[in-house]
Image (spheres, coloured by chain):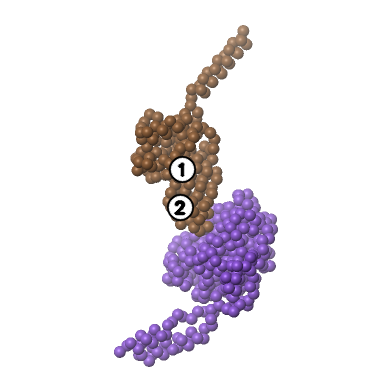
Chain colours: A purple, B brown
């Protein structure tokens, strides 16, 4: 028996050795100051990065959209508080379609407005045709590659599906807790190879649905039941989701002040960030998006700023101290590497010691 | 002669109308004027702006400011609004939260024919005024007389912290008073 256990331990060590190191993203850029003047941010909540690298931020507290260059330089802003077309009542999330149009979801306005990049209104999706007569808090928006629009309908506990012209198609999810398929205040949606990744925020979990509404998988807490916590793969309010071309899923774990990274099957890969105001730290991150070069753009809500992360080789990672002392945005270069599955956590020495204690 | 009679009749009618206007007290402009809410756990934008959304739907809310990091919301009501404290409580509850504190500025009429300090804010909105310096007991004695003396034509504006029901009426622990009267806010 002792020999068997030692063999198991040895094989586990070998398995660990074959797994590659995890490349945790490092912060390469940060910008933003709290305020109301153009270029400043006040309670920002949403972000979308265009194909040309332009960064659009839902500057929620200021009821406007702001555009920045990929290096953080302010470009332009549009919108003001109000209920009229082109005005905003708490824009929470943005997505960009294949033609470069911006889709802005408004929690207070109960609508999704579609704009050209400079702010010219194209059309509005009010939720006509949906059961229960429209949105009750449009919190998140996704435009699929085919142009279909999915809206996280916060107080209605569902994701509403529209065709490219805004015609109602169907609903994903039902209201509730614990069981798969139930949503409780969903806040964001992302696209993953034909499926929908939903930030089931106040169920403290992520759920993946097929476009027809079947649950593909759910995780967060034990067995995906959504118990809040801080362990790997657990959440305390999963607010934002984003995916990259490799099928990685990034989740902003709001009250844990971190970003967690998973593979397409929901297996935990990495996390970065912790609570704080220093560069690389977060104070309640909300939304995130992946830029053209694979960079991760994160809305650091409580610090009124945007932080950009890149998966670098260790020797290329800039020091946080250098970033903080630099005036203005700082850019560091580095190769983007891939994530690898974490080895199972196993302390072989403890097992060996336990085995040796046996009579 | 007929013309002279008609003129006299018109003068008499004007005199009567003017007398009636002087004798009848001005219409009571009674309503909620301002409110300050405290809500625990309002630290996320969906929470704070979701509560804001529900409050904005209350008829009569004219202006609203969210102090997200302080967990506080200030409301200003339009003149002649019909909002009530229970409307505010219901809106916060609909957003999934519970009030941890509510301060109101209310214009109303103090009942003169009773010692019970009831503030009638119109449209079935009434408060029992409580004395914060006397462990929340109903306002009485010198404090009540002082309040009555500050009223103009029986109308007074008070600031108070909303309490649960006391003797069947929502309680309002008095913090202070403003200059009264029918001025439009």
Q: What element carries label 1?
A: strand
Please give the residue where the numbered disc 2 appears in the rendered image. B39
Provide the chain ID for the residue under circle 2: B
Q: Is residue A305 visible?
A: yes
Q: Nearer the viewer, residue B152 or A111?
A: B152
Residue pictured at 59% horizontal, 79% vertical: A315
Kindly indicate the quadrant of the structure image that contains residue A289: bottom right
Quarter of the picture containing the C terminus of chain A is bottom left
Vertical position of residue B146 compared to residue A346: above or below: above
Provide the chain ID for the residue under circle 1: B
Q: Which of A296 and B82 is in front in this view?
A: A296
Q: Where does the image place residue A42, in percent across and percent down from the top left?
A: 58, 57
The answer to which of marks 2 and 1 sits earlier in the sequence is 2
Quarter of the picture containing the N terminus of chain A is bottom left
Q: Nearer the viewer, residue B173 or A163?
A: B173
- Is A349 on the left-hand or right-hand side of A246? left
Hey, which residue is sitting farthest top in the picture?
Answer: B1
Residue pictured at 54% horizontal, 55% vertical: A137
Q: Where does the image place residue B108, in percent across and percent down from the top left?
A: 46, 35
Vertical position of residue A222 compared to residue A109: above or below: below
Vertical position of residue A233 compared to residue B6: above or below: below
Total labels drawn: 2
Whole-number angstrom distance, CA of label 2 to CA of label 1: 15 Å
Hey, which residue is sitting farthest front in the picture?
Answer: A325
Please give the residue where the numbered disc 1 appears in the rendered image. B104
Residue pictured at 45% horizontal, 32% vertical: B150
Q: Where does the image place residue A16, in percent across and percent down from the top left?
A: 48, 84
Mark 1 surroundings within 10 Å by alpha-carbon count, few (fewer than 14), some (14 through 19), many (20 or more): many
Kindly indicate the quadrant of the structure image that contains residue B1: top right
Residue pictured at 48% horizontal, 22% vertical: B23
């Amino acid at each position: 028996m002792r020999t068997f256990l030692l063999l198991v331990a040895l094989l586990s060590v070998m398995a660990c050795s074959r797994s590659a190191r995890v490349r945790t993203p490092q912060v390469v850029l940060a910008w933003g100051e709290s305020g109301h003047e153009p270029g400043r941010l006040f309670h920002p909540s949403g972000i979308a990065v265009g194909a040309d690298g332009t960064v659009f931020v839902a500057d929620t507290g200021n009821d406007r959209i702001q555009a920045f260059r990929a290096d953080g330089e302010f470009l332009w802003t549009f919108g003001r508080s109000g209920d009229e077309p082109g005005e905003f009542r708490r824009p929470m999330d943005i997505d960009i379609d294949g033609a470069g149009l911006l889709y802005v979801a408004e929690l207070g306005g109960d609508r999704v407005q579609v704009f050209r990049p400079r702010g010219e209104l194209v059309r509005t999706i009010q939720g006509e045709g949906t059961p229960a007569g429209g949105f009750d808090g449009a919190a998140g928006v996704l435009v699929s590659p085919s142009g279909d629009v999915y809206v996280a309908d916060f107080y209605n506990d569902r994701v509403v599906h529209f065709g490219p012209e805004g015609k109602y198609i169907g609903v994903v999810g039902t209201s509730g807790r614990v069981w798969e398929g139930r949503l409780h205040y969903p806040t964001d949606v992302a696209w993953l190879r034909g499926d929908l990744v939903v930030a089931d925020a106040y169920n403290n979990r992520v759920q993946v649905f097929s476009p027809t509404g079947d649950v593909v998988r759910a995780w967060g807490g034990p067995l995906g039941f959504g118990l809040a916590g801080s362990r790997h793969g657990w959440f305390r309010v999963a607010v934002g989701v984003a995916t990259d071309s490799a099928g990685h899923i990034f989740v902003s774990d709001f009250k844990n002040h971190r970003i967690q990274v998973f593979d397409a099957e929901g297996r935990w890969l990495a996390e970065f960030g912790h609570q704080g105001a220093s560069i690389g730290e977060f104070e309640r991150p909300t939304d995130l998006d992946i830029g053209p070069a694979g960079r991760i753009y994160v809305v650091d809500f409580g610090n009124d700023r945007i932080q950009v992360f890149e998966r670098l080789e260790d020797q290329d990672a800039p020091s946080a101290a250098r970033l903080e002392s630099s005036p203005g945005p700082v850019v560091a270069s580095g190769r983007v590497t891939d994530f690898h599955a974490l080895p199972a956590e196993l302390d072989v020495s403890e097992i060996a010691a336990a085995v040796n204690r046996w009579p | 002669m007929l013309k002279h009679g008609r003129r006299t009749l018109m003068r008499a009618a004007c005199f009567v109308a003017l007398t009636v206007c002087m004798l009848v007290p001005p219409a009571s402009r009674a309503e909620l004027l301002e409110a300050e809410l405290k809500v625990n756990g309002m630290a996320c934008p969906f929470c704070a702006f979701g509560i804001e959304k529900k409050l904005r739907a209350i008829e009569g809310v004219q202006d609203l400011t969210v102090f997200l990091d302080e967990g506080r919301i200030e409301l200003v009501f339009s003149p002649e609004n019909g909002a009530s404290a229970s409307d505010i409580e219901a809106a916060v509850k609909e957003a999934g939260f519970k009030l941890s504190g509510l301060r109101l500025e209310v214009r109303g009429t103090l009942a003169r024919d009773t010692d019970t300090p009831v503030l009638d804010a119109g449209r079935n909105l009434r408060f029992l005024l409580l004395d914060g310096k006397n462990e929340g007991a109903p306002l009485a004695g010198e404090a009540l007389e002082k309040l009555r003396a500050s009223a103009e034509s029986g109308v007074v504006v008070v600031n108070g912290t909303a309490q649960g029901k006391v003797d069947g009426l929502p309680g309002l622990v008095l913090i202070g008073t403003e200059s009264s009267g029918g001025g439009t806010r």
